[in-house]
Image: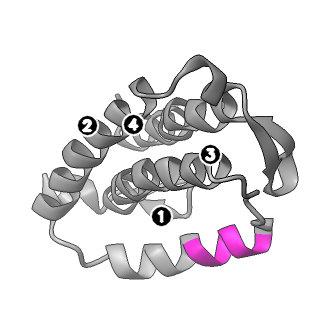
Amino acid sequence: MLRRANVPCPTEERTVGVVFDHIAEGNPQVVAWIQEFLAGRSVPLTPEELNARNADHARRAATRPRAETVQDLKGGSKSTSKAIRSLTEPQLHQTREFAWAGRQEVAWVASAALRHPRGHLKSIREALGS
């Protein structure tokens, strides 16, 4: 499986393993953004900042042990799911500015926990031919 983790994802400019690790890192990030909204703060993130974060992550994740990525995927998915399920209806409708996406509801931010990995998983499947 290690060799498959090193397969490049053509549309990602990263390997399968790095993209999986990127997904694992994204789960807690969604929760952090939700917490920012609920605390009354916007998320002031530029596309350039996001690209820089992703590039830094790719460098760090390139040599990260697979077991750590799998552990973070499982733990992050579980805690993200728990955090999203705990949101009340009024909380889901709170709005703030979200980076370049403009004014959004907490529900939109929470849905990133689905949108974000879905696109990356499609790329992983294409890279692996499955």
Extent of the magenta region: 48-53
Instruction: Estimate the spatial distance between the alpha carbons at disc 2 and disc 1, rounded to whole Å.
Output: 25 Å
Say which mark, if any, is on residue 78: 2
Q: Which residue is mark 4?
A: 83
Q: Quadrant of residue 108?
A: top right
Instruction: Estimate the spatial distance between the alpha carbons at disc 1 and disc 4, rounded to whole Å.
Output: 29 Å
Residue 90, percent across and down?
65, 23
Query: Identity of the amino acid at label 4?
Result: Ala
Q: Does residue 122 appear to the left or right of 104 in the view shown?
A: left
Say which mark, if any, is on residue 14: 1
Q: Earlier in the sequence, mark 2 or mark 1?
A: 1
Instruction: Estimate the spatial distance between the alpha carbons at disc 4 and disc 3, rounded to whole Å.
Output: 12 Å
Query: Identity of the amino acid at label 1?
Result: Arg
Q: Mark 4 and mark 2 in contact (Cβ < 8 Å)? A: no
Q: Earlier in the sequence, mark 1 or mark 3?
A: 1
Query: Identity of the amino acid at label 2?
Result: Lys
Say which mark, if any, is on residue 38: 3
Between marks 2 and 1 in the image, the one whose residue lies nearer the viewer? 2
Query: Identity of the amino acid at label 3?
Result: Leu
**SS class, disc 1:** strand
Instruction: Estimate the spatial distance between the alpha carbons at disc 1 and disc 3, rounded to whole Å.
Output: 33 Å
